[in-house]
Image: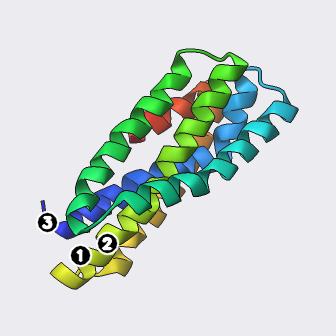
């Protein structure tokens, strides 16, 4: 697959999932019975752990040859982490999965940016056009998930994210 197509698909999928997660995740948590206080705690803990994921994972990448295998691994681990939200809604399970998912998933962005930078130099990729696919996917996901939630309930937030992953 050409670099442009692969990266457009990557950014599209990443921002599609993020377009479902960012505006709607607290609604999904509320839908499974989590209190407003705990939603705030979970979202705050998720934001706090993100920097650790970026530092630890990006610090282990020693060269351009590691970028694609790490991207594939992070995608798989992200899928598994979000599938885990189907298994239980107990508080400690949600805390643990929130930390794991927010450690792994956001780290895909700097890895993807590093891949894109490499492709700009190596294959003369038009970064703006590739990145536009991600922005479009975010808008599509936010609109789609809003409609799905309005018609079918908040369970569709997680369903859409897993489908995107």
* Cα separation between marks 3 and 2: 12 Å
Closer to the eye: label 3 or 2 = 2
| C-alpha span from label 2 to label 1 | 5 Å
Residue drawn at 33 percent across, 56 percent down:
10
Query: Relative to the observer, which residue lies in front, 57 or 108?
Result: 57
What residue is drawn where x is 84% and y is 27%?
Answer: 35
Image mark for residue 119: 1
Q: Secondary structure at mark 2?
A: helix
Q: Earlier in the sequence, mark 1 or mark 3?
A: 3
Mark nearest the camera among 1 and 3 is 1
Mark 3 crowd level (few <14, some 14–19, many ≥20, 10 Å Cα): few
Residue 84 lies, in percent from the top left, at 50, 24
Using the image, tell me which numbered label, if any, was put on residue 54: none
Q: Quadrant of the N terminus?
A: bottom left
Q: Which residue is mark 3?
A: 2
- In the picture, the disc for residue 116 is 2
């Amino acid at each position: 697959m050409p670099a442009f197509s692969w990266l457009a698909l990557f950014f599209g999928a990443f921002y599609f999932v993020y377009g479902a997660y960012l505006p709607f995740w607290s609604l999904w948590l509320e839908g499974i019975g989590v209190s407003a206080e705990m939603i705030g705690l979970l979202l705050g803990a998720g934001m706090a752990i993100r920097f650790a994921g970026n530092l630890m994972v990006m610090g282990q990448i020693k060269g351009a040859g590691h970028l694609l295998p790490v991207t594939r691994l992070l995608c798989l681990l992200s899928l598994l982490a979000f599938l885990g939200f189907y298994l239980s809604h107990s508080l400690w399970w949600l805390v643990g999965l929130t930390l794991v998912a927010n450690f792994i998933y956001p780290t895909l962005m700097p890895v993807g940016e590093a891949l894109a930078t490499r492709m700009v130099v190596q294959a003369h990729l038009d970064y703006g056009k590739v990145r536009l696919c991600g922005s479009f996917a975010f808008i599509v996901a936010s609109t789609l998930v809003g409609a799905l939630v309005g018609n079918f309930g908040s369970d569709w937030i997680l369903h859409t994210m897993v489908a995107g992953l």
